[in-house]
Amino acid sequence: MPNFLNTLFNFFKPAQAKYPADSATEPAQITLCKVLVIVYDPIMDKSTGVTLSQQQRWYRPADLITGFMADMLQVSGGMARFQIVQRVDVDEFPAKTDNFQYTPQTYMSVLRGEAAAHTPVEINYNAILGKYNILQCVANNEIDEVWIFGFPHAGLYESTMGGPGAFWCNAPPLKNTEASKRRFVVMGYSFERYIGEMQEAYGHRARSIMERTFSKLNGDANLWKRFIRYEKSAPGKSACGNIHFAPNSQRDYDWNNPAPVISECHDWQLNFPNFKGDKRIVAASEWGNGDIREHHKWWFNHFPRVAGRKNGIHNNWWQYVVNPQLVIL
């Protein structure tokens, strides 16, 4: 190619982000995430003040938040920390993308199976972002992400990402959110479900973020692909599996499978990044014999959280999971 064409090509070629230099000693950083919590728990009976969660005898959001944060602090070895900077309790059903809102009567008709759920089902995220000035709060570093608590048929994604360079986070990115100046995640939880289901939603978020973190690396360098191996997907190479599949699972949510399998999961927990070929026989007793919360805690507990950086990526994966702004696109 002639020199002037080569120069012209390089001028218009998009700039490629560069990974920082590798290091064996770079400290693993604790990540503090400042959270805005929005709880949609409408009053169902104005004469008594009974809310939806109370009427249905579902879980208290405060208990879910406390339990979830304690679990994540434990399994991350203190690397993932959350601070609730504000909680907003909302006495209404959230609007859908067509601005439809349930009333107590129409919602209970759906819950009892007497009427079909409204379509479109998706919640109006842009209305929520605008009402609570979320983009500006993220830009001002007042908050880092949002947790929305809802209920069946609320229309929440388990997680979705907004901001400049937002990418798939178990759901399509939020549109028109660049004013936040930073990437941020909106988690969707249900107070009909318990802490294990909160961890599952967070696990799908973690999967999306770590897939993107390692997306430029192939073969053995892509440690995420190695981490999520399980016997059915990679015979003889089982590691830690994924949020749905334990090392010996044969299908989704098969966390109570008693079949023994050889796995390198202990090598990940004890020796990363200097693997020693530590392979052991494991079965469901390792991760709680089918208990969703115990399996997810076991899985998260194997995420690397040590010093160093290899191929430009921190050996502490929690820095990316909690703060997706660090993911280099």
Image (cartoon, rainbow, N blue to C red):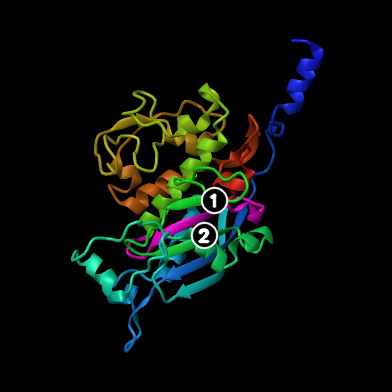
- Residue type, numbered disc 1: Lys
Q: Kindly identify which residue carries mark 1.
A: 175
| Magenta residues, start to end | 175-194
Q: Is residue 243 left or right of residue 222?
A: left
Q: Are marks 1 and 2 in contact (CB under 8 Å)?
A: yes
* Residue 258 left/right relative to 36: left
Residue 78 placement: quadrant: bottom right
- 92 shown above or below 237: below
Residue sitting at x 52%, y 42%: 209
Nearer to us in this view, 228 or 214:
214
Q: Residues within 10 Å of mark 2 (few under 14, many from 20)?
A: some
Note whether residue 250 is visible.
yes
Tell me the tag on residue 139: none
Tell me the CA gap for discs 1 and 2. 8 Å
Q: Residue furthest right?
A: 4
Q: Is residue 252 left or right of residue 272?
A: left
Q: Looking at the picture, does residue 108 appear above or below residue 248?
A: below
Queried whether the magenta region covers residue 182, the answer comes back as yes
Q: Quadrant of the C terminus?
A: top right
The residue closer to the viewer here, 79 or 50, is 50
Of the 4 image quadrants, the one containing the N terminus is top right
| Residue at mark 2 | 126
Rendering coords of residue 92 (x, y %) = 41, 74
| Secondary structure found at label 2 | helix
Residue 301 rendering spot, x and y as whole percentages: 46, 46
